[in-house]
Amino acid sequence: MNIKHLTLLFVAGSMLSGCDKTSSSNCSSELAHKSLSQQIIEQVTKLTADEKYSDKDEYIFEKSKIRATVDQIKIVVEDVRTTEKDPNSSQQFCSGTLKITVPTNVLSDADQARELENRPKISQDARRGDIDDNLNVFTKKDFTFNIQPTDDGDKLYVKSEGAVVIEDFLHRVVASALWKPELEKRKAQMDIQKAAQSQQTQQEKQNIENLKHEAETSKLETERLMAEQEKQEAENLKIELLEKQTTKQSEQNTVVEQENQQDTQTYKKWTANWGNGIIGTVTTEACQISKFASQGYNYSISSSIPIDRLKQKTDAWQVSGDRAITVLGCWLKKDGGVIHAKLKRKKDDKTWEQDFKVDDGSWELDDGSDKD
């Protein structure tokens, strides 16, 4: 925070009545110390509650969890001394040691969250703010504040310009501790992806080794047969093999040609501009999500965004050129030109169902006539 911060508290007059007024109106007033502690806790609660996600207008932390965490933090003022008295008013200037005790579990959660984000530990953060640390106890020496009772002695005002350093520090502690579960969840998802990629890589390597072994075995067998057979037998074998290969290739070419003809006849694709750079695509290609396909959703549907709007690569199912597919799904036919789709968003695994009418004028049909 760059603005000047001023902690201002007051105590109700009923608590300064009678003979208590004198003892409650000096730098050692327990009532003033308690009010100072409460104001710091309230400001930490507000700072944490105001935290929002950078990509959406939603608050990050639940207020109940914030309150449950900050209520465990203890703040006391020790070694208080009066540094100055205003001769023209009842105001007194005070200095002391602010002692903050953070529960070990809260401090541990905050440090673990910072480690997951490759950020310094809380103790290092404290030292940058000239706050001493000893295990879970943090102290701010020469912490200044001033107090002043009202003229009628019914209220006591407590002010501190240095409280902002403490509030910002405790805000970072609380926010880091509350953010830990989300960071652990993201790390677990990343670990699963890395493990899957590693397993796929190992499998590909094994497949290559198997192919090499099979090729070597086949080569040796061919050499053995050619050595045992006479020249004529080898020629006959070559002719026979060539005939088989020619027949097989001819059959394969026929199948491929038939498949291509069928694709040309049945392939269709519809596209629609949904605004903000979002493109919806519906095709008669087979459903790519096996779970949806098993439920009767036969064909493929997706939506894509410009790649420069993609915040993380893991938020996309596929990146092609300058676009990223962020939603993938499957669809089945309904009456009246309506298709019923089941969709899944990549970044949060959200799944929902939705109907579309591809002949309502907002969709452009590509019947595959230009498809290679």
Image (tube, helix red, strand yellow):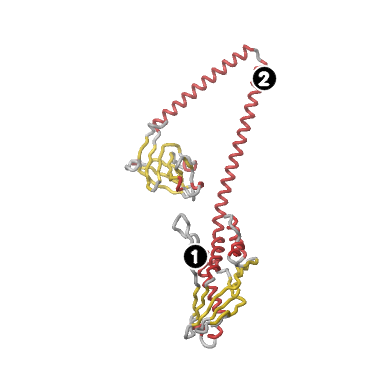
In the figure, is residue 212 to the left or right of 1? right
Q: Earlier in the sequence, mark 1 or mark 2?
A: 1
Density class for disc 2 (Cα within 10 Å; few <14, some 14-19, many ≥20) is: few
Query: Which residue occupies the foreground of this view, 197 or 9?
Result: 9
- Farthest-out residue, front: 87
- Farthest-out residue, bottom: 18
Give coordinates of residue 341: x percent, y percent: 41, 44
Give the amino acid type for the residue marked by disc 2 in the picture: Arg
Q: In the drawing, what numbered circle is on residue 226?
A: none
Query: Which residue occupies the foreground of this view, 294 or 282?
Result: 282
Q: Residue at x 50, y 69 (%)?
A: 43
In the figure, is residue 109 to the left or right of 336? right
Q: Residue at x 62, y 35 (%)?
A: 206
Give coordinates of residue 149: x percent, y percent: 50, 82
Circle 1 or circle 2, nearest the eye? 1
CA gap, disc 1 and disc 2: 85 Å
Q: Residue at x 56, y 63 (%)?
A: 173
Quadrant including the C terminus: top left
Label 1 SS: loop
Q: Residue at x 36, y 37 (%)?
A: 365
Say above or below: 227 vs 289. Answer: above
Say above or below: 320 vs 168. Answer: above
* Residue 298 placement: quadrant: top left
* Residue 183 placement: quadrant: bottom right
- Farthest-out residue, top: 232
Give the amino acid type for the residue marked by disc 1 in the picture: Asn
Label 2 SS: helix
Which residue does the numbered mark 1 point to in the structure image?
2
Asked if the residues shown at circle 1 and circle 2 are in contact, with their CB atoms under 8 angstroms apart, the answer is no
Give coordinates of residue 114: x percent, y percent: 58, 58
Which residue does the numbered mark 2 point to in the structure image?
224
